[in-house]
Image (cartoon, helix red, strand yellow):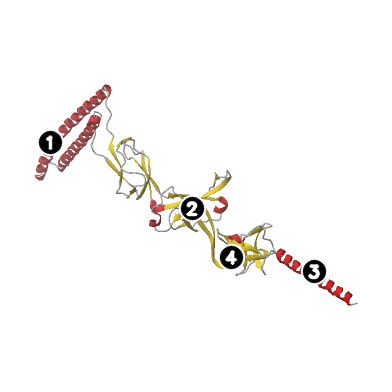
Amino acid sequence: MMHQISVIRKISARWIVVAALGLAVAVLLAVLFWPRAMLVDMATVRLGPIAETVSDQGVARVRQAYVVSALIAGHLERLPLEVGDRVVGAKTVVARIRPAAAAFLDPRARAQAESSVAAAKAVLASAEAQRDQLEAQRVRAVGEFTRTSILAKQAIVAPQALDNAKAAADAADKAVRAAEALIEARRADLSAAESLLTGPEVAGSGFVAITSPASGVVTHLLQQSERDVLAGTPLVEIGETSGLEAQIEFLSQDAVKIKAGDRAEIFNWGGPLPIPAEVRLVEPQGFTKISALGVEEQRTLVMLQFTGPPTDWERLGPGYRVWGRVYLREAPSAMIAPIGTLVRDRGTWAVFRVEGGRAVLRSVKVGAMTDRDAEILSGLSIGDRLVEFPSDQVGSGVRVAPRTSN
C-alpha cells in the first residue's frame, strides 16, 4: 500500500513539472507573437494662420516700353548704348543723325536745274523792275498830294481834289509794298531752284541729337551700327523699369478665382526675399499651351504689379523667369494640420487620429491648403494627435506608437 502511494506521488510530481513547462512555453509564445504597436510619425492639430493661394511661373516685363525712331532721314552714327544701360529721360542722348546729303546729278538733271535757276533769275529781275516803276509812281503821287494840300489850305482847289490826291498816294504806296512782297517770293523761287544744283559735296557738318523719352533701361537695340536711315526708322527700345511687373501664366481654373487688387508676391526670382505685389489685371482671353508632359492646358495671363521699393528688385530685368503667388483667402487663426496627415478615403479627405494607442480613420472637411499645412474645417479638435505620412500598413484599429528620434 505504501509502495502504491509512493508511485502515485512520483507520477503527480512529473505531471506538475510537465504542466509548468507547458505553461511557460505558452507564455513565451504569447509574448513572442503578441502584436506590437507600429512605430509612426505623429503630429498635433494646432491653431495658426493659413492662406489659400495659387501660384505659377512667368516672366518679368516692363509695363511701359518706348521705341525711339529717327526724326529725319540721314546718316546714323553708331549708337553709344548697350542693352542694359540706364538712361535718363530728356537728358541721355540715345542716337545722333547727320542730315542726308543730296544725290549726284546726272547731266540731264543738272541742265534742267540750271534752266530753272535762269528762269527764276529772270522772273526776279522783272519783279524788281516793276517794283522800281511803281516806286516812281508812288513818288509822283506823294508829291502831287503835297502840292494839293498846300493849295487846299489857300482855298485854291476844291476839297474833292485833295481827297483824290490822297487816295492816289495811298494806292501808289500799297502797290510798291505788293511789288516788294512779290520780289521776296521770286527770291524764294530762285533759292529753291538753286537748291536743285546742290550735291553731296556741300553736305552739312551738324547732327540731330535724339534724347531718351523716359528714364529706364535699354531693352533692345533695333539699329546699332552706323548706317543711312529713313525718317521713322526704329532705333532703340527703352523700358521704364519703375513700372516693372510680372506676367504669370495661371491655369484658367485658377485665374477665375483671381481678381484685380488681390495681394500677391514674387518668389523664386533669385533674390533673398519675396517681392510684394498686387494683381493689376487678369486678361479676359485665355490661350492653349502644351505642358512639358505634352498635355494641352488652358492658361490665362495675370499681371502682378510690384509694390515694394524699386531697390528690392534692382537686379531683376525684363524677361527674367519668376514665380508668382496670389492670396485668394487668408485666415489669421485657423485649425490646421500638417498636409502629410491627409489621406483619401472614398473620394473624401480623412486622417488617422490616435485614440487609446490605436489609429482610427476619421473623415474631415478641408479648407485652404498650402505646401505644408491644411485648414481643418470640421472633424477634429485642437490638440488631436494624428499619424503623419501613414504607410499602407496603417489601418483603422492598428496599434501605433510614436517614433522617437535618436
For the question of whether residue 333 can be seen, the reply is no
- Name the front one of labels 3 and 4: 3
- Name the front one of labels 3 and 2: 3
Position of residue 193 measured from the top left corner of the image (x, y, whole percent): 24, 29
Of the image marks 3 and 1, the number of the one nearer the N terminus: 3
Q: Report the amino acid beneath label 4.
A: Thr
**Label 3 to label 2: alpha-carbon separation:** 77 Å
> Residue at the spot x=49%, y=53% of the render?
323
Position of residue 169 measured from the top left corner of the image (x, y, whole percent): 16, 39
For the question of whether residue 22 can be seen, the reply is yes
**Label 3 to label 4: alpha-carbon separation:** 42 Å
- Identify the residue under disc 4: 404
- For the C terminus, the quadrant is bottom right
Q: Quadrant of residue 151?
A: top left
The residue sitting at the top extreme is 107
Q: Report the amino acid beneath label 2.
A: Trp
Label 1 crowding class (10 Å Cα cut-off): few <14, some 14-19, many 20+? some
Secondary structure of the residue carrying numbered label 4: loop
- Identify the residue under disc 2: 323
- Identify the residue under disc 3: 18
Secondary structure of the residue carrying numbered label 1: helix
